[in-house]
């Protein structure tokens, strides 16, 4: 499986993740249970040049904290299962709301593509989106597509390809918080970093701890504790 890569599709509900998934995989999907949860994730393959991209259709959520099991499944997949690339699918007609989740993903992981879908609807509404400016600001590729009309797919697949081969290096922009929070992050981040080594983003885990996210803490204990016991 040297040429096989996992590509997770994340995003708000109703942004066209499954439409994109089905269009790319041609409905050759099977579902797999994930991480001890009864939620099943649709998976399917797409062939691109010499590579196989294994797409994972994550549950649609408005955020990636621990508010619901859907959020946890999507969040845990991105941070613990570490897909090779995470594609965040956004609705071009409600970018402001959709960027909330996109910025959360940029804090969690490095290899991210922002995929702005429903571009056909946005264009009809006179909404112009400059993907080059967004790419520069966000530090990761931003691509416009219409999943229903199968537009923009070659660029999307090519960009996934270029990320997995290292031709593109993502440098996701990090949200800056008020001084008080930044100071707290500075205090705990080195300790967090020591504990989790390079397995997760220490800044992101620090933020979640400051937020009192016990479910995440339990998940870290469960996963990393297990590894230690197994050694
Ligand atoms: N016009 C237009 N409609 C689209 C496009 N992509 C998806 N849709 C429509 O948007 C609706 C939602 O699409 P889904 O693929 O079910 O969205 P989803 O992100 O999987 O939704 P959840 O599973 O609830 O998270 C459907 O009615 C699609 O036909 C597009 O590019 N253009
Ligand atoms: Mg769906």
Image (cartoon, rainbow, N blue to C red):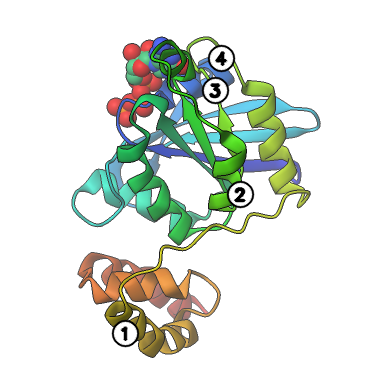
Question: Measured along the vertical axis of the image, is residue 138 above or below residue 96?
Answer: below
- Residue 215, x across and y down, in percent: 23, 65
Q: Nearer the viewer, mark 2 or mark 4?
A: 2
Going from N to C along the chain, the mark reached first, 3 or 2, is 2
Depth check: 101 or 42 in front? 101
Check mark 3 vs ligand 1: CB closer than 8 Å? yes or no: yes
Q: Is residue 19 left or right of residue 155?
A: left
Q: Looking at the image, which residue is at 37% across and 87% down?
A: 188
Q: Nearer the viewer, mark 1 or mark 4?
A: 1
The residue pinned by badge 3 equals: 145
SS for callout 4: loop
Q: Nearer the viewer, mark 1 or mark 2?
A: 2
Q: Nearer the viewer, mark 3 or mark 2?
A: 2
In this rendering, the count of numbered labels is: 4
SS for callout 2: helix
- Residue 42, x across and y down, in percent: 43, 30
Going from N to C along the chain, the mark reached first, 1 or 4, is 4
The residue pinned by badge 1 equals: 184
SS for callout 1: helix
SS for callout 3: loop
Q: Looking at the image, which residue is at 38% across and 14% down?
A: 125
The residue pinned by badge 2 equals: 136
Q: Residues within 10 Å of mark 4 (few under 14, many from 20)?
A: few
Q: Residues within 10 Å of mark 3 (few under 14, many from 20)?
A: many
Going from N to C along the chain, the mark reached first, 3 or 4, is 4
Q: Pointers 1 and 2 in contact (CB under 8 A)? A: no
Q: CA distance from mark 1 to mark 4?
A: 48 Å
Numbered label attached to residue 26: 4
Q: CA distance from mark 1 to mark 3?
A: 40 Å
């Amino acid at each position: 499986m040297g040429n096989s890569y996992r590509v997770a599709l994340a995003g708000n509900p109703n942004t066209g993740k499954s439409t994109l998934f089905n269009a790319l995989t041609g409905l050759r999907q099977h579902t797999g249970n994930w991480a001890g949860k009864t939620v099943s994730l649709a998976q399917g393959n797409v062939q691109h040049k010499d590579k196989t991209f294994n797409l994972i259709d994550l549950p649609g959520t408005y955020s990636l904290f621990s508010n619901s099991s859907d959020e946890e499944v999507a969040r845990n997949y991105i941070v613990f299962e570490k897909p090779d690339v995470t594609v965040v699918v956004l609705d071009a007609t409600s970018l402001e709301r959709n960027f909330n989740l996109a910025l959360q993903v940029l804090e969690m992981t490095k290899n991210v593509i922002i995929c702005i879908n429903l571009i056909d609807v946005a264009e009809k509404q006179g909404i112009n989106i400059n993907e080059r400016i967004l790419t520069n600001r966000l530090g990761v590729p931003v691509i416009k597509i219409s999943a229903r009309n199968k537009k923009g797919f070659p660029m999307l697949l090519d960009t996934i390809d270029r990320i997995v081969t290292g031709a593109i290096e993502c440098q996701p922009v990090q949200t800056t918080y008020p001084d008080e929070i930044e100071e707290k992050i500075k205090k705990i981040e080195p300790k967090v970093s020591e504990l989790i080594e390079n397995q997760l983003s220490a800044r992101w885990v620090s933020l979640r701890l400051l937020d009192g996210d016990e479910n995440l803490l339990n998940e870290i204990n469960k996963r990393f504790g297990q590894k230690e016991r197994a050694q």
